[in-house]
Amino acid sequence: MKSKLLLFALLVSFVFAKSQDWELGITLGPMNYQGDIAQAYVNLAKTKLNFGALGRYTFNPSFAIRGEVNYGKIGGDDKFAVLPPEAYGHNKRNLNFSSSIFEVSTSLEYNFFKFVPGSRRKRFSPFISAGVGIFHFNPTTVYQGQVVHLQPLQTELNKPLYSLTQVCFPIGGGIKWNVKKNWTLGVNYATRFTLTDYIDDVSHNWQTNPTPGNLGQELTYRGDETSNINWQQTVVKNNQDPNSKITVNRGDPKNRDTYMIFGFSLTKTFRKYSCNAF
C-alpha cells in the first residue's frame, strides 16, 4: 500500500515540478460517508474533521490541475437510522464502524470565469472538478470494550478479503477568490465515488447460524446487544432478521460506498513574473 501511495504522490509532484506558476496550501473541513450504515442522509454526530494539503497549477485562465493529500475520519452507526413502522429498520441490526481515510488524488478544474492568481481583474471564479485518487481505509468497531478490526473477520457469508487500498473518483466543485496578491481562499466540495462496498464492512448476506465464540459471526448482527427487550436473544438464520416480516440482506451490494469532503483552503501562488495588470 505504501509503495502505491508513494508512486502516486511522485506522479502528482512531477506535474507541479514542471510548472512555473503554481500554488501550495492547506485545507480543513468536515468529512462524511454514505454506505450501508448511512443511507441517503448525513449524520452530524458522525461527521469528522479532514486535514489536507494541496498544490494547484493554473495553466490557463480556464483550467487548472490540483493535487491533494487528505487525512480524516469517517464512521456510521445504526442507532441513528430511522425505524419505519411495520418494516425493517437498520437500527435493528445495531451495526457501527469507524475508519481513518488517507487519500492522494489529482483533479482537473474548470473555471467558469477567467481566473489568474495574483491578477487584479480575474481574481474570482466558481469551478467544477473531476479526478482520480487512491485511498487507504481500515474499518473497526468496539466490541466488549475492545477495538476490533473488521476486514479479517467473516462478518458476512463468503465475504472476500477485500483490499484496504482502493481507487476513488472525486467529483465536485467550489469557489476560489484571490484575496490579496498571491493569497487565495477557496471552498471546495467533492464526493469520492469508490470501487468498493466495504468501507463500512457491510455489503451482502448475514452469516447463517451464528456460533457463540466466533467473533466474525457474533458481529454479523448486533441487535441482541440493544436495550430493547424485543430484540434480546435474537439469532439471524437463513439471511433473515426474525424481528422483520420481510427477508432482508445485511447490506446492499448494488450500491458502492462513497465519502465526501467539504474543505476550506488557503493557498499561496509562486511565480517568476507578476500579472497584476490583468
Image: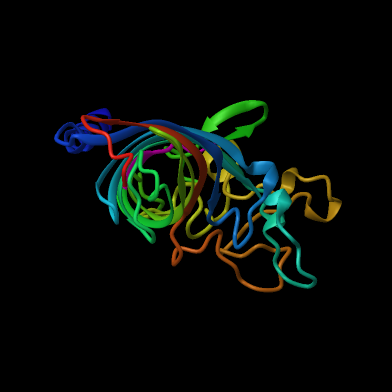
- The total of numbered circles placed on residues is 0
Residue drawn at (54%, 31%) of the image:
148
Q: Between residue 254 and residue 249, name the one nearer to us.
A: 254
Magenta part of the protein: which range? 133-140
**Residue at the outermost left position:** 18
The answer to which quarter of the image holds residue 74 is top right
The verdict on residue 10 being magenta is no
Picture coordinates of residue 100 (x, y %)? 49, 34
Residue drawn at (67%, 58%) of the image:
90
**Residue at the outermost front position:** 277
Does residue 164 appear in this view?
Answer: no
Picture coordinates of residue 179 (x, y %)? 48, 38
Q: Quadrant of the N terminus?
A: top left
* Magenta span main SS: strand
The verdict on residue 135 being magenta is yes
Does residue 134 appear in this view?
Answer: yes
Picture coordinates of residue 222 (x, y %)? 66, 47
Q: Is residue 56 left or right of residue 259?
A: left
**Residue at the outermost top position:** 146
Is 128 drawn above or below residue 247 in the view shown?
Answer: above
Residue drawn at (66%, 73%) of the image:
246
Q: Between residue 278 and residue 252, name the one nearer to us.
A: 278
Q: Is residue 131 left or right of residue 188?
A: left
Q: How is the image coloured?
A: rainbow
Q: Between residue 173 and residue 162, name the one nearer to us.
A: 173
The answer to which quarter of the image holds residue 119 is top left
Q: Is residue 67 left or right of residue 138?
A: left
Picture coordinates of residue 46 (x, y %)? 64, 42
Q: Is residue 247 left or right of residue 172?
A: right
Q: Between residue 269 and residue 35, name the one nearer to us.
A: 269
